[in-house]
């Protein structure tokens, strides 16, 4: 059972009723609450833990949604936004600027790899990807190549839910309800090394991008967009040399390279940016989440000086924007968050503790249902299989029974928040706050092991 550790919030008895009547939750099967099932209502957070309305304590093994990187309860970071409001609560970045946005843009440019010196602020990750797609299209038009509009992305990859980002997203079930989509989304195999087809070497994965660009016609392809570690499908890492070859391919065909780092930036992989972990140079980075550790909603597109060049000429401008992009309170929170990164050596802590985290997960390989363990930094996944020798996966109905019929609820009941997902093959993803250490990994194992052993008995008997 979850551990009682905090009193229920005042008025919590009415929250369930109000939530079921009025709150439309994201990516949620709202009908599942009609038969009396409770909505998990989280009311408090501190460090690596959160508490629900009943006072039950949970280890936040997902950093809420891969984003509360410095942990919960940092009032000092939140206070930076309140202090900024006393000076300037809001002013737009549409033809104006304010100190916090300027300072934050300069700080991000100083941390980003290479000549990524231009920072366009958004309110979140989906907006960042949408902005990047529009940016590369307009960039090519300004350079006299109006037919370069297509985006090469990977199968099962998630890049957002707005219509442009959805065209890049490679998850069929997310795309189908909104078809026809924006034209131009083209997909290639991802880097799931656990499920490479027989005889298909890892070296072919990057070459598949070259072949797709050549098939589409290089004069029609605007950009390639990829995450350093692909989230959907379960933390797919790149093979050696993969991103270096992608960079060469993009240069050969005058195609821009977008590194989608909404999750993988700001310490998740032990570096400020995932491109630094894997030593490649993109033209654009999209980011959000850990930029403020989600103490305020903020994202950004970080572009190279070359991308900015045509927008500095004559009357040209990037014909795009968001009301709250670069919001002064959010920018102040981001600055305070980055102060924590520097002063408390967050990135160094991730690299120091990553081997302990991974060793704990690898120790679960003796459980028959555990097929693969993969990931990088504090971004790891366990793939669950029906037969480990043949790597046979579960059918969709079996996966539904395994993940939603047992694992998700049981892990939560025992005090662990993580993601049980089957947007590819069934996986459990763990992405704890970056302040977690060996004692937390032991706690995770103490919950995961018995639950996975019971899942084995249920599914493989």
Image (tube, rainbow, N blue to C red):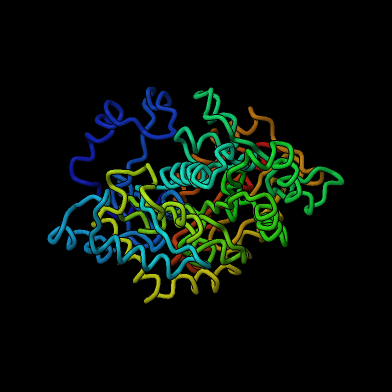
Most foreground residue, 260 or 341: 260
Q: Residue furthest left?
A: 86
Residue 371, position as x, y percentages in the image: 71, 48
Which residue is depicted at the point 29% across and 44% down? Answer: 53
Which residue is depicted at the point 62% across and 66% down? Answer: 279
Which residue is depicted at the point 44% across and 28% down? Answer: 29
Residue 249, position as x, y percentages in the image: 70, 53
Residue 220, position as x, y percentages in the image: 63, 38
Question: Image check: 70 left or right of 303?
Answer: left
Question: Image check: 455 left or right of 437?
Answer: right
Q: Residue furthest front?
A: 314
Which of the 4 quarters of the picture holds residue 147? top right
**Viewer can see residue 169:** no
Which of the 4 quarters of the picture holds residue 74? bottom left
Q: In this rendering, is residue 326 above or below 10?
A: below
**Quadrant for the C terminus in the image:** top right
Question: Image check: 240 left or right of 275?
Answer: right
**Viewer can see residue 347:** yes
Most foreground residue, 184 or 395: 184
Residue 47, position as x, y percentages in the image: 36, 62
């Amino acid at each position: 059972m979850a551990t009682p550790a905090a009193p229920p919030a005042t008025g919590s008895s009415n929250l369930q009723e109000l939530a079921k009547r009025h709150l439309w939750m994201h990516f949620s099967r709202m009908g599942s609450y009609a038969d009396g099932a409770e909505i998990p209502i989280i009311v408090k957070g501190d460090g690596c833990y959160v508490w629900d309305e009943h006072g039950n304590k949970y280890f936040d093994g997902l950093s809420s949604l891969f984003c509360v990187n410095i942990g919960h309860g940092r009032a000092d970071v939140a206070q930076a936004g309140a202090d900024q409001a006393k000076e300037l609560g809001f002013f737009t970045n549409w033809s104006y600027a304010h100190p916090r946005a300027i300072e934050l843009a300069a700080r991000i440019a100083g941390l980003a790899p290479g000549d990524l010196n231009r920072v366009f602020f958004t309110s979140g990750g989906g907006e960042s990807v949408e902005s990047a797609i529009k940016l590369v299209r307009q960039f090519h038009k300004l350079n006299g190549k109006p037919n370069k509009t297509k985006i090469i992305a990977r199968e099962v990859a998630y890049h957002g839910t707005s219509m442009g980002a959805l065209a890049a997203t490679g998850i069929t079930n997310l795309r189908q309800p909104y078809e026809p989509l924006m034209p131009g989304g083209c997909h290639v195999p991802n880097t799931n090394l656990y499920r490479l087809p027989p005889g298909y070497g890892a070296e072919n994965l990057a070459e598949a991008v070259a072949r797709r660009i050549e098939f589409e016609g290089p004069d029609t392809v605007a950009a390639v967009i990829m995450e350093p570690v692909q989230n959907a499908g379960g933390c797919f890492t790149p093979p050696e040399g993969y991103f270096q070859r992608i960079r060469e391919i993009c240069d050969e065909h005058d195609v821009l390279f977008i590194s989608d780092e909404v999750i993988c930036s700001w310490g998740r992989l032990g570096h400020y940016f995932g491109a630094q972990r894997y030593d490649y140079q993109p033209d654009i980075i999209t980011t959000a989440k850990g930029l403020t550790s989600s103490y305020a909603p903020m994202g950004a597109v970080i572009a190279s000086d070359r991308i900015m060049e045509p927008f500095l000429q004559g009357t040209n401008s990037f014909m795009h924007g968001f009301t709250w992009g670069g919001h002064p309170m959010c920018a102040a929170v981001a600055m305070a968050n980055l102060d924590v990164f520097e002063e408390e050596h967050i990135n160094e802590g991730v690299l120091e503790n990553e081997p302990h985290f991974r060793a704990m997960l690898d120790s679960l390989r003796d459980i028959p249902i555990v097929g693969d363990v993969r990931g990088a930094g504090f971004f790891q996944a366990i793939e669950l299989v029906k037969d480990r020798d043949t790597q046979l996966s579960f059918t969709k109905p079996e996966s539904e029974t395994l993940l939603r019929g047992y694992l998700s609820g049981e892990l939560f009941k025992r005090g662990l928040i993580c993601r049980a997902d089957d947007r590819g093959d069934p996986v459990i993803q763990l992405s704890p706050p970056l302040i977690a250490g060996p004692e937390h990994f032991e706690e995770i194992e103490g919950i995961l092991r018995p639950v996975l052993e019971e899942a084995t008995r249920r599914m493989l008997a």
